[in-house]
Each structure stands twice: as structure tokens, then as C-alpha cells.
Amino acid sequence: MGDQGARTKPNIVLVVMDDLGYGDLSCMGNRILRTQRIDSIAENGINLRHMYAASAVCTPSRAALMTGRYPQRVGLPKVLSPTDGAGLSDWEYTLPEMLRDAGYRTAMFGKWHLGCRPEHYPTRHGFDEYAGLLYSNDMHPVELFEGEHITTTDVDQATLTGAYTDQAIDFIKRTADEPFFAYVAHTMPHLPLHVEEGFRGRSAGGKYGDVVENLDHHIGRLLDALDDLGLTDDTLVMVTSDNGPWFEGSTGGLRGTKLHTYEGGIRVPFVAQWPGRIPAGTVSDEVACLFDLLPTLAALTEGSVRPDRPVDGEDISAVLAGGTGPDQRALYFFHWWTLNAVRSGPWKLHLDRFPRDPNRAHHRELPQLFNLELDPAESYDLKDNHPEVLHELLALAARFTADIDAQRSTAEARAAGRATAGAR
């Protein structure tokens, strides 16, 4: 298909699952679920064991992924409902917009969850094609969109994983002669769980396991399609999750789940392959965040990052190649507008938490300081042992909170659609 061997820009396939746990993959140590096809990506490429979502819930996590910016800067710090008027502002410069400007065809299949008004649709934010649900599958009405139109309100959710994959494969076949970006944002394994008939009862992990193994099968179909088209060597494939697991699924022993800014809620699996560019079998403990993908892909595709706004992500292309990342930086984790936690190097500082327990003296044990290298389960508070680290991270937290607070009203206005005309 075309002169693939001469390409310097990779095709890009990004698969994001909804609420898949850090420990749900065999390559992350799971001994119950079978995820051979996803594991093969790690075997042929890299497993980043310290990848973070920018939030423990979906809308803000996806806002950061699309913009390279903390969701608080974007004005989307909480989960949106179908009745919310807020959404992704047209002032934001998104990952698909950047790639389209770099000469890519772009398509998305799956869950969007960045606003439901026409001005928020994926096709208004850089995607040439779109099919999927605009929000989570537990929100009503459940409506399937193609482009900007509803195609059905009678959605058989058991068919969605296969349907998104079919559409992605069709898009790849149609655009194989030019660089493409296929973003597959699976609805599963978010509750309520649905799985196609051929996978029901097959997993030792119950219905949740059936869903994950069904996802693995269809990710394998994507890999096979790339291989059949001769595109494997020219395609960067990445598989991850938007946040930690909810009522089922494994955090791999990490504390907390979805909603929490403990590691189980924000650390996500991330595997990637790009033959010839990512050394096979690489395992990395470099710290990264999903909002790093925008500047990283800009670097790999000769794209650009807008200089007129803070971009929090950093280029981790050297990490993907098996090397080291940028100089040590802090990552900040919020619940809505409240800073909950800071990670810097091996250290994790907790300042607040959600949900708050009304039956206990709130915050009597906070702040908490953990060394994630020694204690990834965040079980032993070391603030009394390392007061200098505590003070350093408290200072970082104060500076970053002030930065976010200074732009909060502008971010909220943009998300609500009241941005000043011509601001972009």
C-alpha cells in the first residue's frame, strides 16, 4: 500500500479502554484474564509501568489526552452528563487537529465524553470521521452517532466492541496510502458490562473477564489488519485505559480504584509497538502521563504545539525508544478543582481525597507522604521521616494550585462556550 518503507511519519493507532485496571493484563501480572494479543504489543515493543491518567474519572482524563493540558486548564474537571452545557472549547488545540495539520487523516470510533452539543462533537475538534457514543454507556439516552447524526437509539452494547473495530479497520484500509490516526475509544469494560455471545462464559474472570478477553480479541483483529496491509512496521500502536477500574477489575495491588487519586485510580496500563523504532521487550519505569502523547506525537510527526498556552505534556519519544524521559517533573492530580496529590520522582504527597468520610475527623491523617519505589501500595506514611521532602512537595503544590486558580474563570468560561470571539 503505497511507499510504506519510505515513510518517516508513522501511522498511529491509539486504543483507550474505559475503566480497564492497571492489573487487568497478563503482561501486568494478571493470572486470571487472558490478554495474549495486547501482551504481544508489549512483547514487540514497550510496557510503560508508570503511565498515569490525568484524572481518576473519564471526562477530565480524556480532556487532558486530547489537549496535552491538565483538565483544570481546559475547564473540564468533572464528569459531564448528557444534560451539561459544557464541553471541549473550540479554543483548545487538540491531538487530532495537530495531526490533521501535519497531514494525517483522522478518525475516532467509540466514547467521546467531552460534550454533547454540536459544537463539542468530535468532528468539530479535528476528526474527519466519527462513530460511537458521546458519553458513558450508563448514561441515558444511549444513542449511537455517525458523524454528527444519531443512527440508532436501540443500541445493542454487546456489539459495540466489534463494531468500533470493524469501522477502524475499514478506515485504515481506505486511508492506507496516506498517514492516518485511528483513535479507538472502547466503551468497555465500563459498567454496565456487555459482551458478544461468542465470549460469554469463556473467562475465568467472570463477565468482566469475558469483556476484557473480548476486547483483546478485537485489538488482535486490528493488529492482523495492519499486518495484512503491510502496515505493521510503519504504525505506532498504543493501548491504554482512561483511569483505574471501578467495581471490578484489578489494580495490580495498588491502593484505591476509579474516583481515587491513590495509584489504583490514576495509574493505567500502557503498551506500545513500532517495529524498528521501539525495541522489542522493553520495560520502562519512567514516569509519564497520557497528556504527554500530544507533544510526543507532534515530535514524531513534524507537528507543532501551540506556543500561546500552557501545555503540560512533554515529549516522551525518547522513553518510547527505550531511553530516559525529560528531567524530573511533578505530576498533579485533582478531584474537580481540589488538588489531591502530587508525584515527584519516587515521592507521592496526598493533600486531600475523595470521597470524604463524614464519620471521621476529616484530614486528621493528611498530608501523607509515600515512597512509591519502596511502597507502591501507599501503605506507610513517611512524612515524619522526610520533612524536607514534605516541605518541597507542599511548596510545589501551593505554586501549582495558584497557577490553576489564576486561570479558573477563563477555563470555565471557555468550557461553557463563553470564550471571547476571536481568542483563538
Image (tube, rainbow, N blue to C red):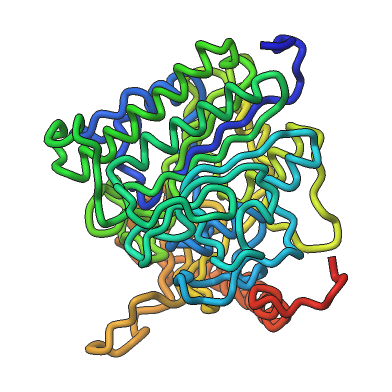
Picture quarter containing residue 352? Answer: bottom left
- Residue at point 45% right, 17% down? 224
Q: Is residue 50 visible?
A: no
Q: Position of residue 392 (x, y in %)?
A: 60, 69
- Residue at point 39% right, 23% down? 220
| 45 or 8, nearer to the observer | 8
Picture quarter containing residue 17? Answer: top left
- Residue at point 62% right, 42% down? 129
Q: Is residue 138 visible?
A: yes
| 206 or 374, nearer to the observer | 206
Q: Quadrant of the C terminus?
A: bottom right
Q: Position of residue 403 (x, y in %)?
A: 71, 75
| 423 or 269, nearer to the observer | 423
Q: Is residue 24 above or below residue 401?
A: above
Q: Position of residue 25 (x, y in %)?
A: 32, 35
- Residue at point 44% right, 38% down? 164
Q: Is residue 3 above or below residue 266?
A: above
**Left or right of residue 33: residue 410:** right
**Left or right of residue 402: residue 155:** left
**Left or right of residue 373: residue 32:** left
Q: Quadrant of the N terminus?
A: top right
**Tally of numbered tags:** 0
Q: Position of residue 255 (x, y in %)?
A: 31, 58
